Amino acid sequence: MECCRRATPGTPLLLLAFLLLSSRTTRSEEDRDTLWDAWGSWSECSRTCGGGASYSLRRCLGSKSCEGRNIRYRTCSNVDCPPEAGDFRAQQCSAHNDVKHHGQFYEWLPVSNDPDNPCSLKCQAKGTALIVELAPKVLDGTRCYTESLDMCISGLCQMVGCDHQLGSNAKEDNCGVCSGDGSTCRLVRGQYKSQLSAPKLDDTVVAIPYGSRHVLLILRGPDHLYLETKTLQGAKGENSLSSTGTFLVGNSSADFQKSLDKETLKMAGPLTADFIVKIRNSEPINSTVQFIFYQPIIHRWRETDFFPCSATCGGGYQLTSAECYDLRSNRVVADQYCNYYPENIKPKPKLQECNLDPCPASDGYKQIMPYDLYHPLPRWEATPWTACSSSCGGGIQSRTVSCVEEDIQGHMTSVEEWKCMYRPKTPIVQPCNIFDCPKWLAQEWSPCTVTCGQGLRYRVVLCIDHRGMHTGGCSPKTKPHIKEECIIPTPCYKPKEKLPVEARGPWYKQAQELEEGASVSEEPSFIPEAWSACTVTCGVGTQVRIVKCQVLLSFSQSVADLPVDECEGPKPASQRACYAGPCNGEVPELNQGETDGLLGGLQDFDELYDWEYEGFTKCSESCGGGVQEAVVSCLNKQTREPADENLCVTSRRPPKLLKACSLDPCPSRWEIGKWSPCSLTCGVGLQTRDVFCSQIRSREMNETVILADDLCRQHKPSTVQACNRFDCPPAWYPAQWQPCSRTCGGGVQKREVLCKQRMADGSFLELPETFCSTSKLASQQACKRDDCPSEWLLSDWSECSTSCGEGTQTRSAICRKVLKTGVSAVVNSSLCPPLPFSSSIRPCMLAACARPGRPSTKHNPHITAARKIYIQTPRQRKLHFVVGGFAYLLPKTAVVLRCPTRRFRKPLITWEKDGQHLISSAHVTVAPFGFLKIHRLKPSDAGVYTCSAGPAREQFVIKLIGGNQKLVARPMSLRSEEEALPVRKANPKEVLQTHKHQNGIFSNGSKAEKRGLAADPGSHYDDLVSRLLEQGGWPGELLASWEVQDSTERNISSEEEQNTEQALMHLPFTIVTEQQRLDDILRNLSQQPEELRDVYSKHLVAQLAQEIFRSHIEHPDTLLKPSEQRIPPVAIPPRKPVSSFTSLVRTSAGEAGGGSRRPHRKPTILRKISAAQQLSASEVVTHLGQTVALASGTLSVLLHCEAIGNPRPTISWARNGEEVQFSDRILLQPDDSLQILAPVEADVGFYTCNATNALGYDSVSIAVTLAGKPLVKTSRMTVINTKEPAITVDIGSTVKTVQGVNVTINCQVAGVPEAEVTWFKNKSKLGSSHHLHEGSLLLTDVSSSDQGLYFCRAANVHGELTENTQLLILDPPQVPTQLEDIRALLSATGPNLPSVLMSPLGTQLVLDPGKSALLGCPIKGHPTPNITWFHGGRSVATITRLTHHILAAGQILQVANLNGESQGEFSCLAQNEAGVLVQKASLIIQDYWWSVDRLATCSASCGNRGIQQPRLRCLLNSTEVSPSHCAGKVRPAVHPVPCNRRDCPSRWMVTSWSACTRSCGGGIQTRRVTCQKLKASGISTPVSNDMCTQLAKRPVDTQACNQQLCVEWAFSSWGQCNGPCIGPRLAVQHRQVFCQTLDGVALPSEQCSALPRPVSTQNCWSEACSVHWRVSLWTLCTATCGNYGFQSRRVECVHARTNKAVPEHLCSWGPRPANWQRCNITPCENMECRDTTRYCEKVKQLKLCQLSQFKSRCCGTCGKV
C-alpha cells in the first residue's frame, strides 16, 4: 500500500495501460509466436434480428508491421425479425427523409440487387425516377441481395451459408434443410386438364400441403386460377388472384403474373397453410395447368425410447421401436401414414440387456422371472398358409404372424409386437401356383367328310397343362369346337341333302373319345339322384329327385358341379307321379293315362310292397369290436325305391339281424383319472391323477391291457398340477422334535415353533409371533417314559491294601434302576448283568518296601502336577499338558495329557473322566505309560480328567472355546443329568453311602470319596477366561512380533476351519498363567461392591493381559508356543509315523518338580557297541542295540537300559509294540533292566526300552531271536490316511491312503548272522532303487499303479521269514469330468421324464405339480462310494409321504407325484473311506391361482350408486397371465364395495331432446333444463337455478336439427327393349336412377343412400328373343360294337317366326340339346390288337399311351417298343 501512496505523476498512464492489457483475453499459442496481441472481446451486434455482424480487434505489439488483419467478423442475431420490423435497407434509406437533397426533401425507397455495387446505399425518391447513392456503404449486416444470406461488412459483400457462418458455402436443399440431402421432401409434378361442364363452374387443380416449397403453377387457356387456404388452426381464406403482383396469402408470399391466355403463380415457401388451387370456368374452351412443387414428408419415422425391461432382475432385455410422427400436429399416427412415403426408411429396433443384478432370495427360493437362462426371447409365430387363391396361373396365400412368448411350461401367449422387433417380421403374403393354367390345344382339321358339296370336318382338341401332359381343368366355355362345316367346290350330281351328312369315318369318333377323357363322366353330363318318397300316404302323389350337371376332373379325380347349361342333351325328369294306395278303401278315379303311369291297377297293390334288408348301419365302434344292425326297409318291388312302412305288412317284417364289425384292437390311448383333492388349502398345493397308457383289445370280452408309456404316441397328459396358489394366513410351524434328553427313565425333548406364512410361490416368510392369532404349539414334551434297564453303580476305589510294595484295591457295586419318573431305586443284584471280577478289584503298587538290613521309610506315590491355566489362541494340531491345571482349547486340537508320577509304576496309572473309568477307543487312547491322548477335541471331550496313581489323584479340566469367543457349553452326560434332576430323592453318592453303611463294606473311604465330585470344578474361572478372550487391548508390539513369525508357523492355523479362527485373537502363543493369579483376581473381585464389580473386572483382566504379554516378551520360554522341533509322543516307537504338525507344550522349570539346579535335558538312552556278554553257558547279558540269539541252554537273558536326563527319566519296556506283562519269569530289576528267565519261543521279538521325562522321551530296541533265525518287526494295524503328505508304517500293516502321498514301509529285521532283506510286489522282486537304509521301502507320490501287496523277506543261514503289507489307493468321492454316462443312464431310466444332475453348488428344476422327476448323482471314487439320499436334511427312507425309487445302485432318485411337500432341496451324500461329497438340487413346483387385487376407481363421485369392484387376476408365480389358465381354479368371492355415498353438489339436469320439427332441410328440437341436487339417499330434489349457475353454465334447451338437404331419387324413362335374351320373347331394358334435391339439384348417390333406390332394370317383350333350339335326326352309329361308338346331330338356334338360324347366344337362356351320344355299347367278339384310328402316331408323340382310352384305340402303335 505504501507504493500506491508515493505514485509518480506517470501512474495514471500506467494504470490505464494495465487496464487495457487486463481487458484482453489470454493470447493463444499462435499469437505468442507472432507480434500480435490477443483478440479483444466481440462488439455488440449491428442488428437485433434478421442477422447482423459483430467484430473483434487486436493490436500489433511490435515496432514493425504485423502480418495479417487486426479485425475479424462473425454473424450474430440470426433470428427472424417480426413482420412489422420492415426491411433493414429500407430503414437506412428512410433515415435520409429529413435531410434535404439539392434543397428538397424526398421520401426514399431502397434500391436492391445492384449488380455493380450491392453494398452501397442506393435509394430512389418516391414517385420519381431519381436514384441517388446516399452512402458509399450500408451498415454491417445488411443483405447483399434480397434472395440471399450474403452480408455486407465494411462495404464488401461477404458470403454467408445457410448455417449463418461467414465464408460458409452451406446451401439449403429443396426441402429447406441446411446441408440436407433432400430426403425430407418429395418432388410433385403433374398436369391438369379442365373438363368443365355448364352446371359445374369450378374445379380443383391440386392441393398443396402445409410446408411445401418452390411452388410453380402455369395455366394456359381462358380460365382463371384462384386460391383457398386453410391453416392448421382451421382458419380459412380465399384469394381470387385478379391482378398481377405479389400478395400475402395466408402469411405466405405469392407472386402472380397474368396475361391474355397465361397465368403464372410462384410461391417460394414454406407455405404456412394448406393451399387448394382451383380453376374457374370462363369460356367453353378447355385449359391446362402444369404444376410443380416440393412437398414435405410430414409423416416421419421416429425412434422411441427403450421399452421397459422384460425382467425386474436376473437379466432381461429391452427394445426400441419406431413410431410414425406427424410433424404438423406433433402427435403419433398410424404406421400406414409413414409407409405411404417410399423415402421413409423405418429404423431397425435396438436391443440391449438390462436389470442384470441377481434376484433377491426369498427363504431359500430364488424368484422366477419371466426371462432367465431357461427362458427364450419372444419370437414371431406364424399360422399355416391359407389355400392358394388360384389353382394355377399365379395366386396368393396369406397367413397371420403374431409375436408370442413362451413361458417355462411351454405355453404360448400373444404379446406386443415391439417385443419381437429385434428380428425382422416374417412375411404374411407369398405367391403360389405360379405355373400356367391348362390350355386347350387344337390339332389339325380332318379332310371333309364329302367329296362334293357341303360336308363336315373334325379335329382333336386336348387340354394340356404346363408340363405338356393331357389333363383336365380347362374351361368348357373356351373350348374350341371339334367340328365345322366344309364345302367341296365340286358340284354333286344328286339331289342336295338338307343337312350335311354326319361323319361316317373315324375322325369324329376319334375327336369325341379324346374329348370325353377317361370315362363318359369326364364330359359334362346329367347325374340324377334317388327319387324321394311319395308326397302322399294314399292316393296319387308325386316324387321328386335332384338332377345335377357334373363332370369328373381327371387331374384331381374329383367330381365338380357345373351350371345346367354346361351339359348337353335332354335333362332327365326331376318329377313324376306316384300312387300310394287307396284312401279309406275307396278306389280312386284315374284316367287311362294315370292308370298306365302308375302301378297297373289296385289288384296288384298288395304284392307291390314288401320288406327287404338294405345293408347295415354304421359300426357302433371304430375299433375293439362293435355291432352293425341290418336296415329293414319297405320297398316298391318294381321301382326298388323306399316306400312308407305303412304300405308293407307288419307281420312280414323280418327279425333284427346283427353282425360283428371293427374287430381290430384299438390304438393305444391315455386313460385319465379324476384329479385328487388339493394337498394344501393355500400356498401352492398339488393335485394328482392317474394317467396310464391302455389298449382295448375286445369290448365283447371286456379285455383292456395296460401298456408302457412309450407305446402311446400322443403327448402324455399331466399327472400333477398345482392348486390353491395363494398366500396362506400366518400360522405356527413346528420343527422336528429334537432327540430325547435321555434314552430311558423319563426325559424331555424340545422343538422350535415359529410363526411363518406360506407364500404363493411355496416359500416361507418368517414373521413375529404377534402375527399368529392362534395359540402357540407346545415346544417341549416328555419322552422315553419307561424304566431304564438295571445297571451297576460303582464306588470309588479303596486305599491300597499294603503300605509298600504291591497290594490291591477294591470297590463296591450296587444294582440300581432309573424308573420312568426319573427316580433311582436300588434293586436286587440279580437284575444287573454279571460284573467282571476286574471291575471290583485291581492291583496297586506303592513305594518299594525296605530291604532287609535297611531302615524302612514309607514313601507314598506322588504325582507331579502343574497348577497352571492354559488358553489356546493359535491353531495347533497337538498340545502336551501335565495334570493339575485347566485348559481352554480350540476344537479339533489333539491333546496329550501326562501324569508324571514318582514311586509308582506307570502301567498301573488309571484315568477317569467325570468319574467314569476311561478305556482306549478310536477317539481316546490310554497309553500304558501314564499318557492320555485325545484325538481332535470335540464338545463331548470337555470335562474333568482324573489321573490316579494309587492313593494319589490329580485332575485336569478341559473346556472348549467356540467360534464367537464364547466357551462351548458342555453337553450333559447321563450321569450329570441324573445328578441335576431336582426330582431325584437322593443323589448316587448318598445312595452309595447309605448302602455302604448298611452292608458294612467300606469302613474307611478315601479322601476323594469323602470329598465327592463337583459337577463342574472349573466353572469359577470361566468368567475371567471369557473376558480375557474378549480383551481387545493387546499391545501393538505383539502384532509386530506376529508379523515376523515364520510363515510355516502361521500356516498351521490356515488349514483348519476359518469360522472359528476368525472369531479368536490372532496371538502367536498360547496363554499360560498361574492358577494363583486368577484366584487372587477372584478374591479381589469378591471384596468389591456389586455395582463396581464389573468395572473392576475389566480393569483387572486388562492388567492381566499386559502381564501375560510382558512375560512373553521377557521370558518367551516360560509360555506355551508352537515348538520348532518334532518330538514324538510318549510310548510310540521311534519309527511309528508321527504327524508333522505336532506341537510341543513346554512348561517352565518349576513344572518339572523337585528343586534340582542341574540343567534340564530330555532323556537319552546310552547305546553300547559291545557284543552281548555270555556270563555263563546259561545266562546272557546285553545292552540295547544288539541282537540276542537264544540257544537251547539259555536260562536267563538280562537286557540293560541306561538313560540319562533331568528330571530323571522313567524306564518302561514294550515287546513288539505292546507293554511287557511282568510275571515270575519276566522281571523288572531295580536298575530298570529287564530279565527273562527260562526264555521260550514265545519270548522271541523286539524289546523296546522307553525313557521318559517331562521334556520328552527316547527309545531303543533290541531283538531276541531263536538260535539266530531271522526276525521281522511287524504291526497288525490298519492305517487310513486322507490328509498327511507322508506316512510311515511297519511291515504287516494294511495301508489305505489317497494318491500323491509318500509311503515308507519299515522292515526292521534281526538275526545272527544279520538277515538280508528282499522286497517283492505281488510276488515280483523290486529293484534296489526303492530301498532305503535298514531295509525300508519308500514309495513316492503313490498312484493307482502302486496299489498291491508288498512282501519283505528276511533270510540268513538259519532260515527266512516273509511278512507283507497291503497298499490300497483311495479315491475320495468327486464329480466326474465326463457326464455322458450318467445322462445316458437318466435317459434310459425315464426317456420322457424331466431330469436334473446334482452338483456341489446346487442346481434347480422347475416342474408342474404331479410330475415325476429323475435326480442324478454323478460320482466317482474308490472304493465305490455309498450314496445316501436326503430331502430337507432327512433321509428319504424315513419320509413316508415321499413317493420315490432309488435306481442304478443309488445314483438315480426318482420322485413321483411331486407336490408342495416333496419340493425343496434334495441332496446325495457320497461317502467312502477317503472322504465325503455332498451334492444338491432343488425341485420347485409352480401353479396358477386367483388373486384379489386392489379396488377399481369408484364408479360415481357422489350420490348413492358409487361402487368399487375388486379386481380379480390370474397369477403364475406372482406374474399376471391370461385368465384362461385359472379356469379350473375356484374363484374367490368378490363383492362390490360402496363408495362416495354423499350428497352431490347442485347441477343442471336435462331431459332428452324432443323429436325434430322437420325431417330434413333444418328443424329445431327442445328439452327441459332444471337445477337439481342428488342426495346420498338417491333422491333428487329441485333447487334454485342460482345454485347451479354459480357452478356451471346453463345448458341450452333448444338446438337445430336435421340440417341435411331434403333429397329424393329421380329416374329417367325406360330405354329400348334391346338387352340380352333371358327367355322366350323376354329381354332386358334399363333406365337411369340418380339422387337430387327437391329443387332438382343433382347430388352424389351417397346422399340418397338412406332412401330405397328404384330399380334400374326390368324384363320386357322382344320379338328378337322369339327363338328356340332346333335339332336334326341322329346319324348312324360310328361302330357296331365296343365302347367307342357314337352318333351326332345338328343343333342350331332358329327364329320362331322365320325359322331361320340366328346367333346361338340368343338361345343361351335355355339348355342347348346334346349334339352327340354313345351308341352300340356292346362287347365285340374276336378283338384284335390293332389301331382303330389314324391319329395313333400323334397319340404316341404326346405320350398318351399310358391312358387306357388311348391305349385300347391305338393298341398296335402303343404296343411297339
Image (cartoon, rainbow, N blue to C red):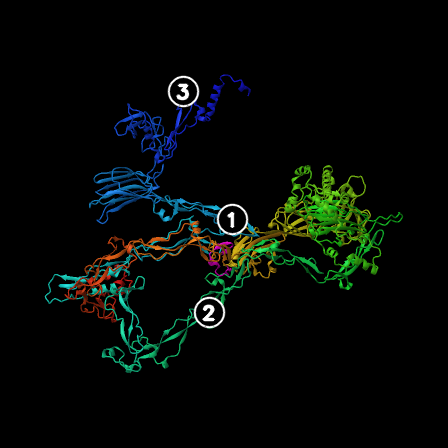
- The residue beneath circle 3 is 65
Q: What's drawn in magenta, residue-wise?
A: 1511-1534
Labels 3, 1: front one: 3
Q: Quadrant of the N terminus?
A: top right
Is disc 2 surrounded by few (<14), some (14 to 19) or many (20+) residues within 10 Å? many
Say above or below: 606 vs 427.
Answer: below
Quadrant of residue 96 within the rendered picture: top left
The residue where tag 1 is placed is 314
Secondary structure at badge 2 equals strand
Residue 849 in the image: x percent, y percent? Answer: 85, 50
Residue 1301: percent from left, percent from top: 63, 47
Looking at the image, which is closer to me, 1314 or 553? 553
Left or right? Give the position of 1701 relative to 1054: left
Marks 2,3: beta carbons within 8 A: no
Comparing labels 2 and 3, the label whose residue is closer to the camera: 3
Question: Residue 162 lies in what quarter of the image?
Answer: top left
Q: Is residue 1361 left or right of residue 275?
A: right
Percent across and percent down for residue 1313 are 73, 47
Residue 1572 covered by magenta stretch: no
Q: Residue at x 25, y 44 (%)?
A: 279
Q: Residues within 10 Å of mark 3 (few under 14, many from 20)?
A: few
Q: Which of 776 and 825 lies nearest the eye of the viewer?
A: 776
- In the rendered image, residue 328, in percent from the top left (x then y), is placed at 36, 44
Cα separation, mark 1 vs mark 2, equals 53 Å
Disc on the earlier residue, 2 or 3: 3
Is 502 above or below relative to 19?
Answer: below
Give the mark nearest the N terminus, 1 or 2.
1
Within 10 Å of the Cα at label 1, are there few (<14), some (14-19), or many (20+) other Cα atoms? many
Q: Is residue 72 visible?
A: yes
Q: Which mark is residue 697?
A: 2
Which is more N-terminal, label 1 or label 3? Answer: 3
